[in-house]
Image (cartoon, grey):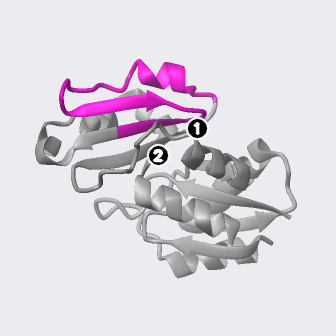
Amino acid sequence: MARYVALLRGINVGGKNLIKMTDLKSCFEEHGFESIATYIQSGNVVFASGEANTTALTDRIERMLVANFDYEASVVLRTRTQMRAIVQRAPEGFGAEPARYRYDVIFLKAPLTAKTAMQSVLTREGVDRAYAGTGVLYFSRLTSRAAQSLLSKIVSMPVYRSMTIRNWNTTTKLAQMLDA
């Protein structure tokens, strides 16, 4: 059984697409997934599956969520190996100064690539920094100037439909959960 994390996009945000994590876990259980754990309310599900085709697995989970929760499901799926690599290959110093910077990982849904996504992610000189990774963008912004960050601009762009954002703490915790 392979271990995965499903990152659900657009649930429990701004009072929309409200899904209880207990209901989400039950849904995964009812559809044959194993070793299921959810993490915080933003739609992170760690699970095991015998399915090796990640595209087919993503499609299956999206159809399952649409049928069970009646919302336009969009899932970014990552394997344990991919999550380890995302954490290990972060830019040097990324996540090292949490009192000074806010750190986020922008997970990209195929076929969107980091190279293409970087063209849409705006940064403000002296506030934001963005780095391309494999299937992700690493984004940091000065906490003292966070209100001036351009990260919030991305939500109004068409490319945002192929992304979901998790902060660095959540990203590293999910990687740890996959290893547990």
Mark 2 is surrounded, within 10 Å at the Cα level, by few (under 14), some (14 to 19) or many (20 or more) other residues, namely many
Distance CA(mark 2)–CA(mark 1): 8 Å
Q: Along the horizontal axis of the image, is 50 left or right of 106?
A: right
Q: Tell me the amino acid under the disc marked 2.
A: Thr
Q: Which residue is mark 1?
A: 109
Residue lying at 45% horizontally and 71% vertically, measured from the top left:
40
Where 92 falls versus 65 (above or below)?
above
In what quadrant of the picture does the N terminus appear? bottom right
Residue 171 visible in rendering: yes
In what quadrant of the picture does the C terminus appear? bottom right
Confirm or deny contact between disc 2 and disc 1 (CB under 8 A): yes
Residue 169 picture location, percent across and down: 42, 60
Residue 140 picture location, percent across and down: 32, 40
Where 101 falls versus 159 (above or below)?
below
The magenta segment: 111-139
Residue lying at 57% horizontally and 28% vertically, measured from the top left:
112
Residue lying at 72% horizontally and 77% vertically, measured from the top left:
29
Give the numbered dot on residue 88.
none
Residue 77 visible in rendering: no
Q: Along the horizontal axis of the image, is 124 left or right of 51?
A: left
Locate residue 5: give its quadrant.
bottom right
Residue lying at 57% horizontally and 26% vertically, measured from the top left:
113
Magenta stretch contains residue 134: yes
